[in-house]
Image (cartoon, coloured by chain):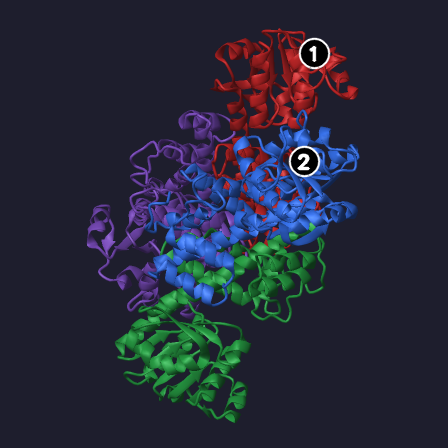
Chain colours: A green, B blue, C purple, D red
């Protein structure tokens, strides 16, 4: 298919590469030119303007936040203005449920089609087309997107006919991961105070009931106090919990554990944690509150 | 080895059976006689008094709580009075860190040996000797207990030379599980309000990052609202979180997520949840607070 | 002075009346005409359009939320377009810190003056010019507003030279009140479970250390379960806590008690509490969670 | 009346002095002799043993915690053994509800009378007989104690016929005060981040809705970061919140704000706060989490 990709961060670049590998005709657009070059070498075409990336059957957006999507979609010369009637916008960014709803409405007004298709997986999985995709939107639009979604992910879950519900599901997954981080952080603060080595403790956990990769990956970071370089930076963690709480607030769903996580991220960022730290660094705040000795220089 | 087992609930009975299967000479004691019979058929001998279960090289206790251990260990004719010098008490009950410390001190005073060896695993695992064992105490005592621990568990982790630390580790594991329950409960309340079927949602989770058995097992119960019969009753969940918080309080470790869990268990028990409900029923309280329709008659 | 008043809810009507009483020349504007009449009888003039209320030296806005201010200030024919250079906009609405900042910037661009002057006090205090006023903005602008602020309040506190800081102070006051409500709610749930009558308990509190009107007023409502008609409706309580948390989030200030309050308001609204209930109704949720018998039909 | 007073800390000494001033015949007992002398000068008699303080019509206990009461009441030669049939034990210590219940039962067994009469007020109020007294127990016992309670307090509230309920009421009052401290701490952290001086802010609060002494007293300490010397030391604050939570747990009453306070006290104590700090020091933890500059050397 003829498809555009807007937003060439680590995730967007991987996504474009996967589409190329699957044989699609890909036009890429990025605000800063440097990120475009490697994809040209892989066969992509370069768009000078957003509109140039909107001339195919579909255009992906993989952007950092609501503000970027607002600019790219609703700005002058943006996607809403540029996309042809019947063409498809696939939004893979982790954005707010509300923004996803606004996109759905605006596209419908223009006779364009829209699905939300946020993904689960780190950049290395994006690069090899092994993401998990949560897709939502009208059945016809999802069917049309299928060859593209197959190219970027190992599996697609159709979540709902309402696009924004896919964003809700994505946000809930990040919440579940952050909950594991917090619980490990508290358990390790307690265990360290009992004189047990955190790495030994983690080995016990992962050898028994907690063998899942989430526990291994984040447990190692918390035990070692090694949060740099970040796989997923702390401010992004805050952003996603904030988006979850906003969506939950709109639906009047109180989420006390999510509230606790938000306070943890704010504490982390207020005390020097930022872009340079992985979001798992909130897993050391329980030890800080407990006055447990800090073991690493990488720590706040 | 010649060994006593005191406390023949589901866990203690399984433990005694595993010891018998491994060829040990087992004497069992239980306050109510009925639970003794099945083990006699498997080759155990019956003790009429606690003291009669203390005549071997070692005696296990697998009791429900601190009060039971207090009675059996420190009461008239109890283990402290009855156990021979140099003999070993293996405490496998999930009891308080403080009580474990008191046992350690009392046994040391008498020249007896003591290890804490709480276990991870449900009754069906106990019955086939496949528990995980967290053992702590003096190296010599743990070595002496090895043939017995090998009989009851698939693997033993030596946690510390201080017995009560094993109890701390055990309590922290139950905390980690309860944290998963709470996080699933909140996520499902949110997701249900978004119109997604909870079982479909769970299938997505367990097909992606949350493939571990904890998520599958508890997720199914929360999604279906099916909490009876309990695998681990709600009051036991409260007990263990309470013991964790007490131990953490003694060490001045604040655990806000554990505090949240305690409040959830109290809410559950105050609203009709009790012995008949699995502890995972706290996973429906987020939905209750959100006013989400309740799907099952098994629910509070 | 010649002054406009936009927004004639209970608070705005009281404010206009106080200005009239103090001898100012007042032009009023309200979206729905009915609320205008009583003020005409008191000597006010009626504006047919927002612009007509902007022809004096100053214009007050007393509106329900950010959306209303957005419309009235930034919409076509709104205050930003209509106010003369050098004229003054006094924003007394309880709105977001961010919106107050946007107003400040937009007025500065146009050479208009702007102060935020949110107030503390119920409608009956507004009606007799006995509000407390938190004013912030440039010193010259505040001086210019002084005769007007003196007319509406018993006392004006100058908070900062940045207008939006006055909004932050106002929100923090509502947070402090809501905290008293929550603490009373928890204490009364506990005390009721101990068999003490809530009204007797309240009498003890207010006779000893808690003699302040906040405790008397809200304590009586919580003890009696009488939350209708509302003095300040529950959705407004949620709104203000939400605005506080957003402002605190922007400054990276974690506020765990405010997070708890937000969850309480969401629970209340999700379970049938709404416009018809006073915000103090969150003070019965602790009793609900504790399974304490509910004493009144007015309760959720 | 002939009355003993056991426990001559600041509160107990004030209580004994007030009884003497009212003309009662007072015998005092304290573990360390030094605190006895000043009272002898005021006309008290000294008891060499607990039993010697139990020979009158009544004996007060004003001790620091459950452990001290356990020793003094239930130990060899303690009150239970020594008090005459029909004589009265008045327990004014802030102890657990459970311990108060045990005292009630033990005294009843011996044909002795028992009331709980915990007090509200600082040492300076105790010294001049201006405490508030929460009394609970059988009506006859309370009547008998009336001349004594009148001597120590400005007012007595009869709470219940069950002694331990008075302890519950007392604990709930300390919870309400600690809630004010926490709410002020959060509000001031937020306000300081907005660039407002904390003392100016406090002046606004106490001039408007928050004129009560609690706000003035604790607000000043938090604003100034001046927590030494303590009026009520931080570990006592933790103790009382812990007792409240235990009593609430027994009754299955979840108290999330109390849980938050407990975590605050633990954080304070784990980070160097202790005997030398007033319990209001928890009111600076919100600022610490927010990374707000600390203004005083007295701070952790």
Q: Nearer the viewer, residue A232 or C85?
A: A232
| Residue A280, quarter of picture | bottom right
Q: Looking at the image, is B9 positioned above or below residue B139?
A: above
Q: Nearer the viewer, residue D205 or D72?
A: D72
User: Taking the image as drawn, is residue D221 in sight?
Assistant: no
Query: Residue B256 location, x and y as percent?
Result: 56, 48
Please state the chain letter of the residue tagged with numbered disc 2 in the rendered image: D
Residue carrying label 2: D230
Q: Is residue D178 left or right of residue B198?
A: right
Q: Is residue B277 left or right of residue A185?
A: left
Residue carrying label 1: D53
Q: Is residue D171 left or right of residue B205?
A: right
| Residue B61, quarter of picture | top right
Q: Which element carries disc 2, helix, strand or loop?
A: loop
Instruction: Name the residue located 32 percent from the left edge and 55 percent from the top edge.
Output: C2
Q: Quadrant of the N terminus of chain B?
A: top right
Query: Residue A45 location, x and y as percent?
Result: 45, 92
Instruction: Name the residue located 76 percent from the left edge and 49 percent from the top edge.
Output: B143
| Residue B188, quarter of picture | bottom left
- Quick check: marks 1 and 2 in contact, CB under 8 Å? no
Q: Looking at the image, is B70 positioned above or below residue C114?
A: above
Earlier sequence position, callout 1 versus callout 2: 1
Is disc 2 surrounded by few (<14), some (14 to 19) or many (20+) residues within 10 Å? Answer: some
Query: Residue B229 location, x and y as percent?
Result: 42, 44
User: Taking the image as drawn, is residue A160 in sight?
Assistant: yes
Which labelled disc corresponds to residue A224? none
Please state the chain letter of the residue tagged with numbered disc 1 in the rendered image: D
Q: Nearer the viewer, mark 1 or mark 2?
A: 1
Q: Looking at the image, is D76 positioned above or below residue D290?
A: above
């Amino acid at each position: 298919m003829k498809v555009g990709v807007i937003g060439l961060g680590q995730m967007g670049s991987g996504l474009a590469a996967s589409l190329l590998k699957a044989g699609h005709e890909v036009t890429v657009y990025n605000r800063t030119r440097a990120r475009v070059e490697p994809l040209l070498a892989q066969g992509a075409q370069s768009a000078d303007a957003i509109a140039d990336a909107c001339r195919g059957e579909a255009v992906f957006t993989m952007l950092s936040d609501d503000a970027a999507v607002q600019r790219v979609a609703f700005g002058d010369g943006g996607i809403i203005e540029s996309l042809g009637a019947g063409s498809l916008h696939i939004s893979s960014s982790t954005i707010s449920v509300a923004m996803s709803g606004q996109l759905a409405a605006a596209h419908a007004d223009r006779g364009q089609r829209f699905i939300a298709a946020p993904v689960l997986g780190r950049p290395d999985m994006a690069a090899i087309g092994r993401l998990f995709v949560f897709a939502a939107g009208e059945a016809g639009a999802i069917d049309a997107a299928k060859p593209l979604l197959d190219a970027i992910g190992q599996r697609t879950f159709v979540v709902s006919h309402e696009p924004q519900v896919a964003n809700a599901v994505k946000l809930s997954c990040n919440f579940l991961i952050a909950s594991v981080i917090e619980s490990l952080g508290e358990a390790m603060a307690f265990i360290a105070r009992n004189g047990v080595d955190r790495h030994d403790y983690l080995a016990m956990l992962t050898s028994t009931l907690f063998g899942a990769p989430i526990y291994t990956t984040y447990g190692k970071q918390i035990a070692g106090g090694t949060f740099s370089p970040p796989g997923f930076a702390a401010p992004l963690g805050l952003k996603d919990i904030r988006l979850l709480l906003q969506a939950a607030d709109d639906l009047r769903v109180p989420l006390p554990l999510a509230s606790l996580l938000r306070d943890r991220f704010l504490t982390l960022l207020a005390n020097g944690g930022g872009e340079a730290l992985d979001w798992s660094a909130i897993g050391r705040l329980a030890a800080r509150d407990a006055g447990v000795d800090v073991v690493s220089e990488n720590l706040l």
